[in-house]
Amino acid sequence: MAAAETDSKITFSLDLYHVSEELGFILPEPLKELPPYYQPWMDIALRVPELVHSHELRSHINKMPLLSSKFLQKHRELRLAHLALGVMTMGYVWQEGENDTAEILPCNLAVPYWEVSQRLGLPPIFTHADGVLANWRKKDPEGPFDMENLELLFSLPGGDSVRGFFMVTLLVELAAVPALRSIPNVINGVRCGDTEAVARALEDISQSIQDMTDALKLMHVYVKPSIFYGIMRIYLSGWKDNPSMPKGLVYEGVQTEAMEYSGGSAAQSSLLHCFDELLGIKHGENSGAFLTRMRDYMPPTHKQFIQDISLQPSLKSFVQQQASERLNQAFHLCVTKLLSLRSYHISVVSRFITVPAARARQLRNQSQDFEKEVISRAPTALEERGTGGSGIMTFLKTVRDQTKDAFLPETM
Ligand code: HEM
């Protein structure tokens, strides 16, 4: 993808970046099946929760044949393969919890996973692009895109809460689609000095961000905090900045040195990266470095989309120059809605991580019967960290507070 999209003669549009008008960053109609040659992968990947539960996943994967990735051709085949290999990898590494992690990913899994990852430009670990964007199907193909009609292709340990977690995140992605459709209108409007068009597009973006917050609220309906914290979270964790895997993971047959990759997180969703770039929100050194690194976990065309938004003439300067009341207010509303989304997200994180972490610590300190509580089985190394490896609350509050810096001085 050329950075020619910054050329003011070319109309900025979504399809240049494989961003869908209907589904945004969500992969349209993910495949459910691979060519029959890959059945040995599918047979295991579809049974990951049950095989982890019976402690048999590693032995099944160790016996799996080493398959060539060359029969995978289309983008959607590669995405399905990346997802299937990803769930197997997370199950393999974390099957026995934080104290008996795998140090080596066997070559029959590592080699094709590496090859597929190279071809997609994704890292060889389970990402947001896998678990959320490419991991869905409609039960009734003609039915609506809603919680009742959506199903996962692959799951991880944690039962219905896993479905809830991925599907609610998918609905947040869906709620953002009108905002994504409006981004080219903002950019093209700034280029040709159309104040009204930019104001209208920003109003649409504000509404869409509000809808994302409303969709995020469903997390409380469909995901149990104790299951998220005590069971699911470890399977989303990576092998970078993770005390349980200080050396990283050796991908056997790929290279002899261990490699480090961050775990899956919606920090890898391209949405907020786009809004930040559009609104001119800058993140400081530490939080900024983490968020920038997360862009390497996105499909390359989506990363390019964010990059090209960042290269456009400044929206904030345009708003200041035009001195239009409506435009000022629309810009202000956008920043306000983004700030509220981030604040709401912090309250979600508190409910799903901070509170259960405190409860787990309390239970561990009391000797009686704590083994019975799911929550107390949670990995201790992750208590203060996000699955991406960050020190959670400090990071999230810094990022939220930096959003405030985008307000125009006179509208604060
Ligand atoms: C139970 C639900 C959720 C939990 C527990 C959670 C937790 C976290 C944590 C711990 C981080 C810190 C970074 C890391 O370590 O990866 C983070 C970052 C982030 N999460 Fe979530 N998250 C949840 C749902 C979501 C959803 C549905 C979205 C929306 C797509 C989202 C968007 C983000 C973003 C954009 C960041 C980066 C920080 C920022 O830009 O403000 N999260 N999340």
Image (spheres, rainbow, N blue to C red):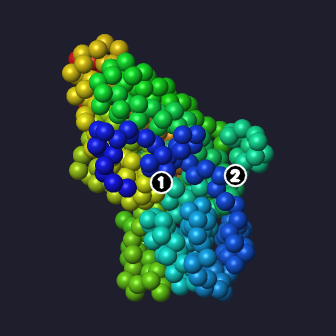
Mark 1 C-beta closer than 8 Å to ligand 1? yes
Residue 112's place in the image compared with 404, above or below, is below
Where, by quadrant of the figure, is residue 78 drawn?
Answer: bottom right
What label does residue 200 carry, if any?
A: none
* Rendered residue at 49%/50% (across/down): 18
Residue type, label 2: Arg
Which x, y percent locates residue 316?
26, 29
- Residue 83 is situated, as x and y percent measured from the top left of the image, at 59, 64
* Left or right of residue 105, residue 141 in this image: right
Name the secondary structure under disc 2: strand
Of callouts 2 and 1, the N-terminal one:
2
Which residue occupies the foreground of this view, 1 or 163? 1
Residue 132 is left or right of residue 294, and the answer is right
Quadrant of the image for the N terminus? bottom left
Of all residues, the one furthest to the top in this rendering is 325
Q: Which mark is residue 137?
A: 2
Residue 265 badge: 1
What residue is shown at x 70% (from left), y 65% (from top)? 33
Closest to the observer, 54 or 412: 412
| Vertical side of 87 occupied by 323: above or below | above
- Residue at left offset 38%, top offset 38%: 11
Q: Position of residue 248 (x, y in %)?
A: 41, 74
